[in-house]
Image: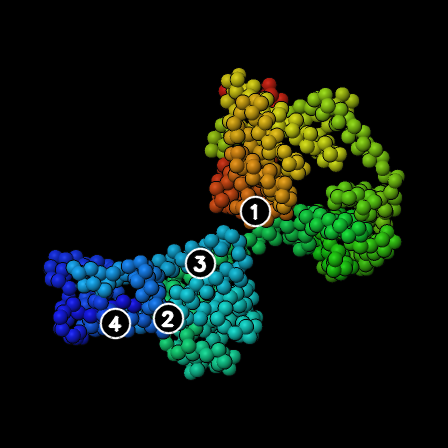
Amino acid sequence: MPVSAPHTSGPPSHHGILPPAPLADAPLRRALDASDNAIVMSNSTRHVVYVNEGFTRLFGFSPAEVLGKYLSDVLLGPHSDPGLLSEIRDGIDQQGGFHIETLLYSKAGQPRWVSMMINASNEASGGPGGSITVLTDITLTKMHEVLQKRVLEGMVNELPLADLMALVCREVERIAPEVTASILSVDELGLLHPLAAPGLPPAICQALDGVPIGPCVGSCGTAAFRRAPVVVTDITTDPLWADYRTLFEPSGMRACWSSPICDHAGKVIGTFAFYFREPRAPDALHHRLVDVCLHLCALAIERNATRQRIHQLAFFDELTGLPNRAMFRSSAERALASLRQEDHPGAVLFIDLDRFKQVNDTLGHAAGDALLCEVAKRLTQCLRARDLIGRLAGDEFVLLLSECSTGQVVQMAQSILQEMARPMDLHGQAHVCHASIGIAMFPDDGDAIDTLLRHADQAMVQAKSDHRHSLQLFSAEMNRRAQERAALERALRQALADRSLSLHYQPQVLSSAPGTLHGVEALARWQHPEWGMVPPSRFIPVAEEAGLIHELTLWLLDEACAQLSAWRAAGHSVPCVAVNLSGRSFHQAEFAQQVCDALERHGLRTNDVLLEITESVMMDARPVTLANIEALHHKGFKLSLDDFGTGYSSLSYLHRLPISELKLDMAFVQDLTTSPTARALTVSVLSIAHSLGMVVVAEGVETTGQQQWLQAHGCPVMQGYLFGRPMPPDELEAWLCAPARGVS
């Protein structure tokens, strides 16, 4: 570290050193002393010839304690950078100056992170070969801008909690090298679990896992128990450490300061500890570090718990703990893909309990719930490790068996029926449960999970109708519906060819002003001359399976753009039109350009059309899908995620993909006034959307109760029969012209 000798003609002395000539100017000295920065002048021999009062305030040394000395002898400490001096010399020799952030020490031995700016001096300020050093205290900056910034970035990037807590520990140890940090969680039972302690031996973390908190459980267990910080200045003598000295002795730790981590409600959810290798108490820097870190740790732990709760609510059945429909479908799709790749058979079993309603009616719903839990337990016990299970709804369960022949599946189904028939104890009453099972084989009865589920369901219905307590394989006799489907496909192809399909438009209104149009959603409709109105729920799946969905998507997009352009020409104010895009369209390399071409044909801009995608598109890792999404985003299109919460979405994709809108599925909206789960999920979606700057559109709003709840919780846009049904263009025009529309 550069220092300077006195600028005199005689030999250097440590006493009676005069400052450089310019500092004889009193106003200049007063200006320098008033600075918050520490200013040091050194001569050509690197001895200090001047320090301002800011230096004394920052480091505690008086001028007499510094003048005539090497600055490095004064400020370097046990954890300072050992290569600092050579870096400084090289910087000054090569560039005439040097800038670095480094760790120095005060007179009291406290670490100080400083920004050090060194420049070679001239004759006027100290003589040739000397230097001027400006030191700025950045300790708090390091804590807030470095520690906090890095941790919050880790949260945004969805680092696992253990990795995030390890990051906190490492950053703390970098800012205060004399410290070894550890973070423990406290579970609902009051047990400790290490989250991160990179500087401690793994054996210690293993030994502490599952230790209950208490009045004499070291520093951490005691701090959690007392709900207050615990400082132990000497582990070897403090009675709180009587049971843990032997465990920690090999680590060399001699002191420990632990603080409880509390959630927003004041509940202890963890501990944050500083260990030292010598008997001592924490200093002011350590207190400031802990103040910052406790907040960050609480935020990270709470956020992780919330994410886990949201995931549990979204993808698992609350009663049985089994995967719900969304989770099962997603897992099954991956399992089928593996079976397909390896050319192995499989099977889907659709299981429905017989006379389950009778149990609820005679024994009560509590007994019914107990029955469902027992069934879930028995079914799980029947499975192999590679099989899947889920609860679809009510008393409907589904299994996916991998790598099994028809004979093996039938044998498994018979074993399940026998297991179900064993008496169960339902609140002190013996009950025999029977079930009916439908079986669909992969790939013979279907290549996709939805097809297999449908066929297995059909087979189960047949089993119930033929003979309860039995199993039924999907067979050729059940192909009547398949034939009907084939007829529907042919008719759909013709309808697409002669453009006999139509679009209806449902208004989307602002929550703050329900009579104000936010936009409209374009919905395909099919009026068949023989069958009448064919619902989308019937012909859209056919289009998907028949490979017609991309053609249907392009028609819908073109028709919606043409209609919006016509409305604009007629003077009708329609802000934008939302168009549902099929996931399979994103598999077409030219799809993004086709979307752009449709808008250009009708003289529309990208913000005139909102593109709705499903969670399957968001999760699709195909390069062609990602390329189309990126191209659409680059062109300025806004993407809306439809039916959010009903699929297998990962929250990480929400900030990685250009999603600007979330559509809350009507299944949640319908249950808002009756279901705590629906309300909890909806609040979570609104919170996620708000934090990511996304708009939420609540679908299926049919009652004023639903509307009022959504308004009260800040949902910006609503859509549903309460405001308007899907309408042909002329009816929507009448709706637009109505003097008082919507619900206030």
Q: Are marks 3 and 2 in contact (CB under 8 Å)?
A: no
Task: Report the coloring of the rendering.
Answer: rainbow
**Looking at the image, which is closer to me, 336 or 516?**
336
Residue 494, relative to residue 644: is it above or below?
above
Residue named by callout 4: 70
Residue named by callout 3: 296
Q: Are marks 1 and 2 in contact (CB under 8 Å)?
A: no
Q: Amino acid at mark 4?
A: Tyr
Residue named by callout 1: 653
Residue placed at 33% from the left, 72% from the top? 77
Q: Closer to the N terminus: mark 1 or mark 4?
A: 4
Quadrant of the drawing holding the N terminus = bottom left
Q: Secondary structure at mark 4?
A: loop
Horizontal and vertical percent position of residue 250: 50, 80
Horizontal and vertical percent position of residue 379: 76, 57
Q: Secondary structure at mark 1?
A: helix
